[in-house]
Amino acid sequence: MIVSVDVYTKDLDAGLNAYKKAMESGAHDIQLNSSHDYESKELEHFNLMFQADHTSEVHSFLDDGPFAKNYDDL
């Protein structure tokens, strides 16, 4: 079964590593976006989104990293 993944982090290196892990594990429609405060232009968080099989090893990789399902939980 294909599942949609949508997680947040403040750690760019972790986001890039997760992007690479998703690519290597066969995920598709992978996106890594940044969000900045409108006024101060300060970085708020990174958002990683992709589609992957529910048995993919990338899911456990995300569980072990600095990722949250909601950016308010960072």
Image (cartoon, helix red, strand yellow):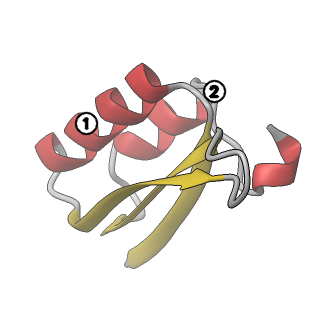
Q: Quadrant of the N terminus?
A: bottom left
Residue shown at the point (14%, 56%) measured from the top left: 26
49 and 52: which one is in front?
49
Residue shown at the point (44%, 28%) measured from the top left: 12
Label for residue 51?
none
Residue 65: quadrant of the picture: top right
Estimate the x, y position of residue 36 in percent, counting from the top left.
Answer: 61, 51
Which one is earlier in the sequence, the residue at label 2 or at label 1? Answer: 1
18 in relation to 40, above or below = above
Residue 45: quadrant of the picture: top right
Answer few, some or many: residues within 10 Å of disc 2's Cα (few below 14, many 20 plus, some between 14 and 19). some
Badge 1 element: helix
Q: Which residue is mark 2?
A: 66
Residue shown at the point (58%, 24%) measured from the top left: 64
Estimate the x, y position of residue 44 in percent, counting from the top left.
Answer: 68, 43
The extreme front residue here reads 39
Estimate the x, y position of residue 63 in percent, counting from the top left.
Answer: 60, 35
Which amino acid, mark 1?
A: Lys
Q: Which residue is mark 1?
A: 21
Badge 2 element: loop
